[in-house]
Image: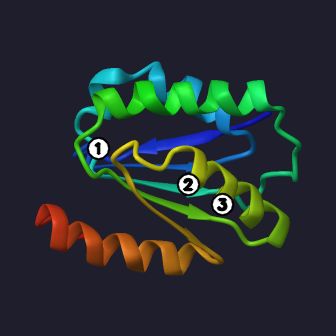
Amino acid sequence: MTVTFDFSPTHDFFDHKLQHFSVANDQLLAAPDRIRKLKYDVIDAALMEPTFFSPSEMDGIVLQDLRIASYAVPGLLVALVAERNVVFALARMWEAFIEGIGWETKIFPSLAEAQDWVRIRAKEKFQVELC
């Protein structure tokens, strides 16, 4: 299972292609100092295969997200790209589980829409100009 990551040179964002939530979280948690500098995260789940998450697996993912949130700036922007309906449904389930974590999350059908939203919200929320 491959997850590719790109921390920006200024560490304002974290961009990655996702195939499984817990793998991405493990790799992100390996760099807690970088998490503190993040303003937004763009998660491209286009490669993610529809997966059944048991309640214990979902609890584990939520616990990882809580750990990430403990390092992150309040109101971290999280844009998740879910091109397929079944992945969108999984993303909505995840979003419901992490409600109240302090992140501003939104799910998009395309990477371009996610990037546009992040560009607008990062400027409004963090006064960060993105190209």
Residue 103 in picture, x, y percent from top left: 37, 51
The picture places residue 94, in percent across and down from the top left corner, at 63, 49
The image quarter in which residue 4 lies: top right
Determine which residue is flagged by label 2. Answer: 43
Tell me if residue 23 can be seen.
no
Horizontal arrangement in the rendering, residue 59 relative to residue 120 (left or right): right
Density class for disc 3 (Cα within 10 Å; few <14, some 14-19, many ≥20) is some
Q: Is label 1 in a helix, a strand or a loop? A: loop
Q: Residue at coordinates 48% horizontally, 50% vertically from top-left?
A: 99
Of tags 1 and 3, the one toward the viewer is: 3
Q: Which mark is residue 38?
A: 1
Tell me which numbered mark, 1 or 3, is placed earlier along the sequence.
1
* Whole-number angstrom distance, CA of label 2 to CA of label 1: 13 Å
Q: Which image quadrant: the C terminus?
A: bottom left
Q: Quadrant of residue 88?
A: bottom right
- Residue drawn 41% across the image and 30% down it: 68
Pointer 2 or 1: first along the chain: 1
Badge 2 or badge 3: first in the primary sequence: 2
| Dot 2: element | strand
Eyeballing the image, is 31 above or below 106?
above
Q: Is residue 63 above or below residue 126?
A: above
Which residue type does callout 3 highlight? Arg
Estimate the spatial distance between the alpha carbons at disc 1 and disc 3, rounded to whole Å: 23 Å
Under mark 2, the amino acid is Ile
Q: What is the three-letter code of the residue carrying label 1?
A: Leu
Give the CA distance from mark 2 to mark 3. Answer: 14 Å
Quadrant of the image containing the N terminus: top right
In the picture provided, is 96 more to the left or to the right than 65? right
Q: In this rendering, would 56 be left or right of 95?
A: right
Query: In the drawing, what numbered circle is on residue 92?
Result: 3
